[in-house]
Image (cartoon, rainbow, N blue to C red):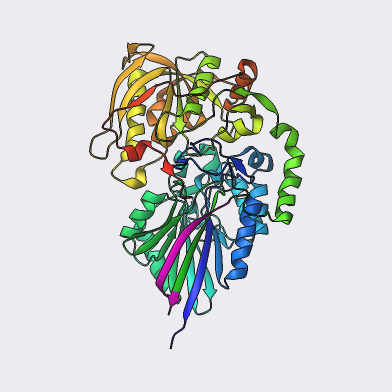
Amino acid sequence: MHEFEELVILYTSDSHCQLFPSFTLNKDFSTQLKWCSTDHPTIVGGFSYLATLVKKYREKYPHVLLLDSGDSFSDSMIANKTKGKLPLIAMNSLHYDAMTPGNHDIDYGLGQLKKLSKAAKFPLLAANLLDEFTLSPLLGKAYLLKKFHSTTVAIYGLTYHLTPETTSRKNIKGAKYELDFQKIERDLTEIKKQGVELILILSHLGSEVDEELAKQVKNIDIIIGGHSHDPQPTKIVNGVIIAQTTPYFSGLGMLKLLLRQGKIVKHKGRIIPILPEKIEPDLKIEQMLNDTRILYENELNEVIGYSHSPLVRSYKSESPIDTFIGNVLRKMTRSEISILPGRGFGLTIPSGYVTREEITNFIPHGSKVYKVLLKGKDILEALEQSILNQINQDVTKRVGGLIQITGLNFVYTFSEQINPKISHVYVNGIALNPEQTYTVVLNQLMYEGGHQYRSLKKGQLLTKYQLKDNDMVIYYIKHHSPITVHKEGWSIPLIKTDQKFTQKTCLPF
């Protein structure tokens, strides 16, 4: 008679190197998530608190996997100071089993990602991140086999295939990204031949692509996802269990499997909130993190100004903080229009005194700033591309959030049933002239045509500035405090716009 076995999968994703607890005083929790209850916690997250939970479940259950779905090494000031080393040291100390890199894990360059991969005590799995010359997995491994009693599990990694659209070209030199469902299926078929009972995809593709993967590729049992900040304890698509936890180490994902002869007979998923008021920190890990933080404490905690309003980022609609940033860049470069990407990361900063660390966490990459001359028709093409980026019928081609504009007003429609629609485009109250040129300020990603904005590459370069974007913003706040940050109505959705494209998702706590 065959006995039942239990396997517990613990997982994290999209921490964006938020290693310390975060204050959540506002309804807007982050760029893509909100509190839907008025009685929500005020402090969430913290790696040392996560560590306590992980150790608790390892003591409770004999067979535990700990996985991460990427975007762990970058996107905060403390990450910048250590070039991703501090989050890696933390993850090593907690003995992760595997990780797939996210699109932001390469933001310090391919060379640094390779160094972090070599220093990791767990494999960074990415079957679709290849050396452009040898076409072999660039970080060494596409998958990992783990044996639990009588069940062998394969963990197969897939990073974000559109990473070249989300980072500077210099960061990915020597790398080739792909997403070939047929090749993935061939790989999984070969893996199955090694006596593997369960195949788990560790993905940074985003929930929409995860679902498409489940529909089109055979031999997948589980997908542990990331990238889209779209928490779901479990969802079944074509017989495949799909799960994704909350970002910023705010929640620990848990998937409990009951197995018999290597087959899943029962499963249960949940997302466990990381609430410092209810969990004791792991003191050893907390000390390690604090020992590093104290080296940069004065710079991190430098007060640069005061804000009368919370600093909020939105992904699929006009973003208050990005409107502020765009206005700053436009004023400091004396440009008519600013065009910035829709960014998917960022925790809301409460009103009050603002520190250098908080602003840097919103604009972590220190992008170069360019002033260009662009024709109206090229600007209009970029606006249309922004809508297509959200609603493309081929979900594998969707990338980024709503384009962030100041100095130009436009009305848009998000709908999967209607072609991308832009109307009522005005500059300083005058209708946009397709053949007229306008002065436009761009960051590095937009200047290179990232997020598929190829028309922005047609601009004539006027000025490349010495100050980077985050330095410009910090300088401005220092000299114009107190500030107020809010939506200004540069981009307005029509009533026909599908709410799922513009509204934030509720946290599942």
Q: Judge whether 69 appears above or below 394 on screen.
A: below
Position of residue 292 in the picture relative to residue 507 (left or right)? right
Please tell me whether residue 88 is drawn above or below residue 76 in the rendered image. Answer: below
Farthest residue in the front direction? 39
Judge left or right: residue 407 versus residue 10.
left
Q: Residue furthest left?
A: 417
Dominant secondary structure, magenta: strand
Residue 460 image offset from top left, x and y in percent: 44, 19
Residue 81 in the figure: left or right of residue 197: right
Residue in the picture at 53% in, 58% down: 11
Q: Position of residue 172 (x, y in %)?
A: 52, 43
Q: For residue 56, what is the image quadrant?
A: bottom right
Residue 300's spot in the image, x, y percent? 69, 34
The reply to whether the magenta stretch includes residue 439 is no
Locate the N terminus by quadrant.
bottom left
What is the count of numbered marks?
0
Asked which quadrant contains residue 215, the reply is: bottom left
- The reply to whether residue 115 is in sight is no
Magenta-drawn segment = 259-274
Q: Position of residue 295 (x, y in %)?
A: 76, 40
Q: Residue at x 46, y 69 (%)?
A: 257
Residue 214 vs residue 414, the one in the foreground:
414
| In-front residue for pair 177/472 | 472
User: Residue at (59%, 70%) from the top-left corner?
Assistant: 60
